Image (cartoon, grey):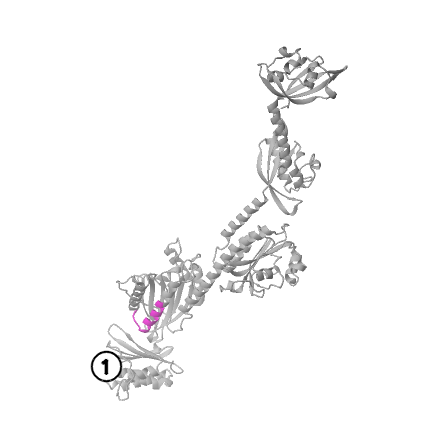
Amino acid sequence: MERYPATAFVDGRGRVSLWSPEAEALLGYTAEEVLGTPAADLLPLPGEREAALAAGEGPPAGQGWDGVRRVRHHDGHAVRLAVRVRPMLGAAGHAGWAVSAADAGQAERETVDRAIGQVLFSQCPFPVTVHDRDLRYRWVNDATARAVGVPAERLVGRRIGDDSPYADVSKLEHMLRRVRDGGEPVLDLQVHGRVPSDPDHTRVWSASSFRLTDPAGGLLGMCQWYVDVTEGHRAQQRLALLSEASERIGTTLDVAITAQELADTAVPDLADMAAVDLFEATMQGEEFPPGPVDRNVRARRAGLSSTRRGTPEAAYLVGEAVAYHPGTPQARCLATGMPVLVRKVDADETYALDERRASRVRETGIHSLMALPLLARGTTLGVAFFSRSLNPEPYDEGDVALAEDFCSRAAVWVDNARRYTREHTTALALQRSLLPRSLPDTLAVETAYRYLPTASHAGTGGDWFDVLPLSGARVAMVVGDVIGHDLHAAAVMGRLRTAVHTLADLDLDPDEVLTQLDDLVIRLARDDPDVQGATCLYAVYDPVSRRCVLARAGHPPPALVQPDGTVAFLEDIPSGPPLGVGAFPFETSERRLEEGTLLALYTDGLVEAPGQDVDVGLKRLARALAGAEGPLEQMCGEIVEAVAPQRQSDDVALLLARTHVLEADRVVSWDLRADSAQVAQARSLAARQLAKWDLESLLFTTELIVSELVTNAIRHARGPIRLRLVRADSLICEVTDGSLSAPHLRRARINDEGGRGLFLVAQVSSRWGTRYGRDCKTIWAEQPLSGPPR
């Protein structure tokens, strides 16, 4: 609106000759009431200027005047008016006065508003511009001129981008066209650019725009303002990067994988190339002394990532040993334990003593870099290196702060992985010491095995297996699984395995072995509530009779592969309860196996997987066994690869045993009467058999063993008595009688006439012992086929 809307004209005689509707609205007088009347009637407080106006005289000094006057309203009250009086000239000179007026209060407010507006736009800290329909500058404030670095008068009439630092010119022009053509304002549009005061860094502005229209709705232009949100934008980027890091880093407890995740997360948001070097001690899970680190420490490149294919910026690739030369950022970082920032890299200066790195800097254009120690719990684990070559912005302190936060969090994950590596190595070492390192060679069976620790927890569990030689060329095969997947389970497994060895030496039947193990687990659980039980399968195979006796305690049934390739699971073996339940008997099942039969003993980790029925795993195992060919070692690997779950959540143990039969000419036996005369006959029979086997070198010791064992049977036991010689991987001499009394080895005193028999047998044999049948016992002794007794 005009500042003085009410107008009137006072002629040379001092009378009102023109009266506008706005004047009527302001003072309440109609034109008919005012026209022709003296102007002095409206000016009750005439001064020198007012008097001249009332008299129609010319202006003092030839000038008009402005002021605030009290004027009488039609209804009688006084009105404060802001009055502007200007002289009017005609052909004859002074012709009168042009008077314009407005409510003084409103005029004062408009004057103040106009002054505030001018100050506001001149002192506004952020850029404000006005553009015409052609998107040209019509008006800019001082902040715009400072930001652009161009005087305001030079900007007016030009288009955005002609003298603008903004890189997003097309984005800004699109916003202005959208406001101009659509009429809707646009708020908070982010644009990027650079300013003369900070040409090295890209700034971020929040741009907003709206239309300017006249009272009739006509377009006057578009107003646009910018708010610098660079710091907020960077803070959001940092938070986003840290959030991404928390999700991407530390997904596994593997030191090398964690280092690679750190490098991958840093590119491209933080760096064009990121490298992570870890000390050898860190990668091996060892402890490292706190404090600064000497540059000669042994380190290895563990993580590497780049925006460029092939990472041409890297002087060392993943897996290579890394050297830190004096004066390099990495060496300074390790020596001080503090970040090192190089805003502008000079290859010859920064890497004066490291030509390998200097050449990469020159070749790839690395212009800015940072080196930061990976610190966790006061210990330096390695060093992280970040560089920029494609991104033109140099690093600054804000980037260092972000990298510090980033690396400190990553270092904790690396340290967790290191600690896990140490615990994992310790656990695996313990488990390796508890499991058999190799299986014995026997004539009864050919064996092979595979053991896969669980992928979770500490990588240990309670699965175990064993092949134990027994008397009479027999062999025991055992597979067990302690409930649990930790060091505690492994420790319990070791105790059970030791117990199995002891029970095997006693030559107990499979069901008796499981009964003894059940009692042991019950006692262990009594002392340690964490002991939850175990499952076990125990089998004994006799290559002479081809009999295989099996018993199981809550364990999956073994698989039997006939020589013709037929596969069957021995599910008819009575399944007793798991070890540790007690109060339930275990039963045995007997099979007669053809030579070349394959027996597969396994733990449930091989056939069970989360969310999968166990029958699916058993069918896979049956198919793998039916199709497996070649050596047992090869078959073991193929079966585990084909059957074991991809996402292994339990230990896997597989034991394959292919049966052999001891030929008839390797076994001979005789029935003897309970008569002392039979002792000489037994020696004679044994001597003739040794001659047939070309074992005359063992004649003396064999005659001694036969004589003592047969004599003991005749004197202390009852018939029938049987002597058996077995030529296996050793010479086995067995004497069986119908008594269940146990022999006792003792040292005879000087005056004793007897009691030296078993002592002599023990001295000349590699091992000896007693095994019991249902109604008989057998005393046996073994001699190596060559060499002295073990």
Q: Quadrant of residue 690?
A: bottom left
Q: Say above or below: 211 vs 533.
A: above
Q: Say above or below: 747 vs 218.
A: below
Residue 693, given in percent of the width and then of the height, sits at 37, 82
Residue sitting nearer the eye, 379 or 116:
116
Q: Is residue 686 magenta?
A: no
| Residue 250 shown left or right of residue 533 in the figure | right
Name the chief secondary structure element in magenta.
helix
Residue drawn at x 49%, y 63% is 285
Q: Is residue 508 magenta?
A: yes
Q: Is residue 524 visible?
A: yes
| Residue 185 shown left or right of residue 783 in the figure | right
Q: Is residue 599 visible?
A: no
Q: Quadrant of residue 610?
A: bottom left
Bounds of the magenta segment = 495-509
Residue 86, given in percent of the width and then of the height, sits at 70, 20
**What residue is disc 1 on?**
716
The three-letter code of the residue at mark 1 reads His
